[in-house]
Image (spheres, helix red, strand yellow):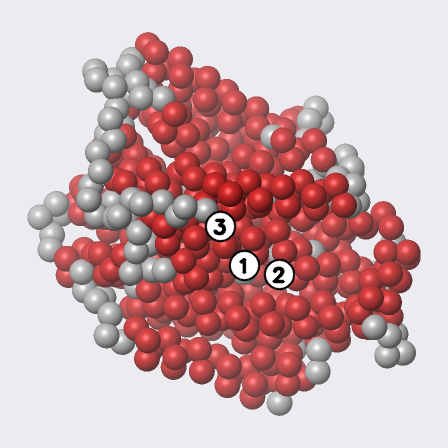
Amino acid sequence: MTLLTFLLFTGVVALVTWRLTRGDDHASEEGYFLAGRRLTGPVIAGSLLLTNLSTEQLVGLNGAAFEDGISVMAWEVVAAIALVLLALMFLPRYLKSGVATVPQFLEERYGKTTRTVTTLIFVAAYALILLPIVLYTGARGLNGMLDVANLTGISDEAANLWISVWVIGIVGSIYAIWGGLRTVAVSDTLNGFGLLVGGVLITVFGLQAVAGNGGSVLEGWTSMRSQHPEMFRSLGTNEQSVPWHTLFTGVLILNLFYWTTNQQIIQRTFGARNLAEGQKGVLLAGLFKVLAPAILVIPGIIAFTLFAGQGVDKDGAYGLLVRTVLPAPLTGFFAAAMVGAILSSFNSALNSTATLYSLGIYKSKLNPSAGHKKVVRAGRICGVIVAVFAMSTAPLLIRAGGIFQYLQEMNAIYFIPLFAVVLVGLLNKTASERAALITLAFSLSAMILGSFVFKGAIESQMNFFHYVGLVFALSVVVMLVSGAIWPRETPYQQVHSGDVDMTPWPYARIAGIGLVAVVVGIYALFA
């Protein structure tokens, strides 16, 4: 029954997505990479959430909560502040330029060399860091829910991991490589509904299991808080993965980059029908982010309450919880929705990688005269190569330990250089391309050395996220000093491309202020 409902839900999503997108333009650059600039607010919100909401969060963040409690909600709740800044500050500038990629915006701001360098950084980071982690955590979660060892008859954990990785990778590649951005966005929205329903059910059934003997959700919540009050402190200690003081340094900066500058995430906002729809979608996503701990953090604490002392691995706790508290038919349904989340993150990153390569390297450098079909074809070939590489390396992450912490530290390597250059470029009109390239070289070197060569020495003196914040601050200083020494010949003036209607949503500022107030309130409630 579990396998049957899994296949049924997966098939329905694929069929509906095909029906809704079969007449779309997949041959032109705007149609394939920007969904024809037809995306509305709800679709943007759903796609943003599902691109982000994958097994790094379901498995990794709940695993972190299994160990550290509710303080890890910082990775979700603080994101709402970043989304407010995206809606009010970053998105209007991106849409005004009519760009398809962040490096394309940086070319307009600085020059062609900056675009090429940042494109290569994005492509390398997605291929080496993001895509393998998405596949690995997806396979771990799927194996735990569906008991893949029993289905395959293979007892070797590593072998089952390889099988799950390749199945997920092949299906995700079909969506991303042959479907384009709108196919990705539509399937994201459909899977999002299933994941939301399934995630809430896991929390509900889990709390009832904590209560025991047919107890209510409220009884389970009360029991859990009374048994483990230390797990419900919003401000983490120095011994935990997110100490409270890192909220103002590395944790905040990583959230800001992820939601305002990360191509994989914000590409769907570039496909907005107009600025108003883009702002609606972004702020709606922000509202759901402040509610996300209900399905991304609380289940980890439930798993701790039920399984602590039983030798459960933190990254395996979520899959075990799902298999334990959900009835078999619902387990299959949720596993299918979870695969949808895995596919969402995987195919979104893959689609973004193809977009970056085909527009930023192939058309910009290798074949400037290429027509639409050749550019799209180059993106698809790049997608296939990157997908095969990711599927081949993902199972090796079994040695990485706590996967969510590992993901954030690896992401910081390229988040910090890129965010420094984008932010200064938006706020300073005289910084030149030379300043941008010097800053990228300095910041990338500092992050690589700090992450792989001197990490032990750094962590003996400070939390690694403080080091992330320090490198960002120094990168901004390097950028400003270099820009003062080698300024642009003329100050940068942004020109409206005319591609997008720039009339803002009238309630954007009010909604943004409200979201920030909710974030502060949540932290105060659990302080």
In the rendered image, which residue does mark 1 sit on?
Answer: 53
Picture coordinates of residue 434 (x, y %)?
Answer: 29, 21
> Looking at the figure, which quarter contains the C terminus?
top right
In the rendered image, which residue does mark 3 sit on?
Answer: 283
Is residue 92 visible in the rendered structure shown here?
yes
From the viewer's side, name the closer residue of 257 and 155: 257
Quadrant of res 392 = bottom left
Q: Identify the residue shown where x is 55% and y is 82%.
A: 6
The answer to whether the residues at label 1 and label 2 have Cβ atoms under 8 Å apart is yes
Q: Secondary structure at mark 3?
A: helix
Label located before the other in sequence (1 or 2) = 1
In the rendered image, which residue does mark 2 sit on?
Answer: 58
Picture coordinates of residue 29 (x, y %)?
Answer: 20, 56
Q: Identify the residue shown where x is 57% and y is 30%.
A: 468
Label 1 vs label 3: CA separation?
A: 16 Å
> Looking at the figure, which quarter contains the N terminus?
bottom right
Q: Residues within 10 Å of mark 3 (few under 14, many from 20)?
A: many
Q: Identify the residue shown where x is 33% and y is 37%.
A: 93
Residue pushed farthest left? 369
| Image side of residue 189 versus residue 251, left or right | left
Picture coordinates of residue 419 (x, y %)?
Answer: 44, 33
Instruction: Indicate the amino acid at tag 3.
Output: Leu
Quadrant of res 221 = bottom right
Label 1 vs label 2: CA separation?
A: 7 Å
Q: Secondary structure at mark 1?
A: loop
Where 333 falls versus 132 (above or below)?
below
